[in-house]
Image (spheres, rainbow, N blue to C red):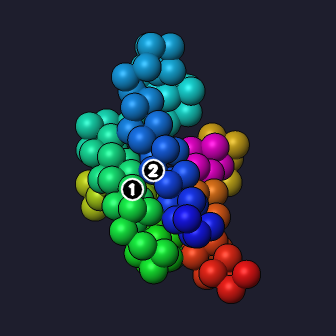
Amino acid sequence: MSILRKFALGYFVVLLGAAALNYVPGITDAEGLAFGIFALDLFDDALHLASALWALSAALISHRASKVFLVLFGALYLGDGVFGFFTGFGYLDFGIFTNPSAGMSFTMFRVLANAPHIALGAVAFWAGLRLDRA
C-alpha cells in the first residue's frame, strides 16, 4: 500500500471521528459547542461523513485516486478554513451564503474554530503534491 493510500486511509479515520463528535458524550457543552469552540450540525456531520467515505474509497481504489482525493480535499478544506478568517463562516457548509459576514478576525476563538480545516487541508494538499515524488 502506497504512502498516499495510507494517508487517505488516515483521513478516513480522522473524518469519521469528526463526524462522530456530536454523538460522543462530553464533547459538546450545554450550548452545543464541540470542545466549547465550534458548533457542528447535521449538515456538518454529513459533510464529514461524505468526506470520510471519499477518503476510504480513494484509499481502496488506487494510489492515483488517493492522490486526487488528497489534492482536491486539501484545496477545498484549506480554502474553507481561510474563508473562516475572512468571514467567520466557510463555504463547504454554505455558511457564507446563509449568514452575514462577521468580518475578518484573528482572535483565538476564530483561530481555533478554523484550525482543523486549515490543518487537515494543508497536510492533505501537501501530501498529495509532495509525497508522490518521494
Category of crowding for the residue at label 2, using alpha-carbon neighbours closer than 10 angstroms: few (below 14), some (14–19), many (at least 20): many
Please name whichever residue, 106 or 129, is drawn nearer the observer in this view of the structure: 129
Element type at mark 2: helix
Amino acid tagged 1: Leu
Element type at mark 1: helix
- Vertical placement of 20 versus 84: above or below? above
Residue 109 screen position, x and y as percent? 63, 40
Q: Residue at x 44, y 62 (%)?
A: 59
- Vertical placement of 53 versus 3: above or below? above
- Vertical placement of 59 versus 110: above or below? below
Q: Are marks 1 and 2 in contact (CB under 8 Å)?
A: yes
| Residue indicated by mark 2 | 12
- Vertical placement of 122 versus 63: above or below? above
The verdict on residue 112 being magenta is: yes
Q: How many marks?
A: 2
Residue span colored magenta: 111-117
| Residue indicated by mark 1 | 56
Amino acid tagged 2: Phe
Quarter holding the N terminus is bottom right
Disc number placed over residue 43 in the picture, else none = none
Q: Residue at x 45, y 80 (%)?
A: 64
Residue 93 screen position, x and y as percent? 32, 54
Chain-order first, disc 1 or disc 2: 2
Q: Residue at x 26, y 37 (%)?
A: 42
Quadrant of residue 113 within the rendered picture: top right
**Helix, strand or loop: magenta stretch:** helix
**Left or right for 60, reference 13:** left
Please name whichever residue, 97 or 68, is drawn nearer the observer in this view of the structure: 68
The verdict on residue 40 being magenta is: no
- The span from disc 1 to disc 2 (Cα, nearest Å) is 5 Å
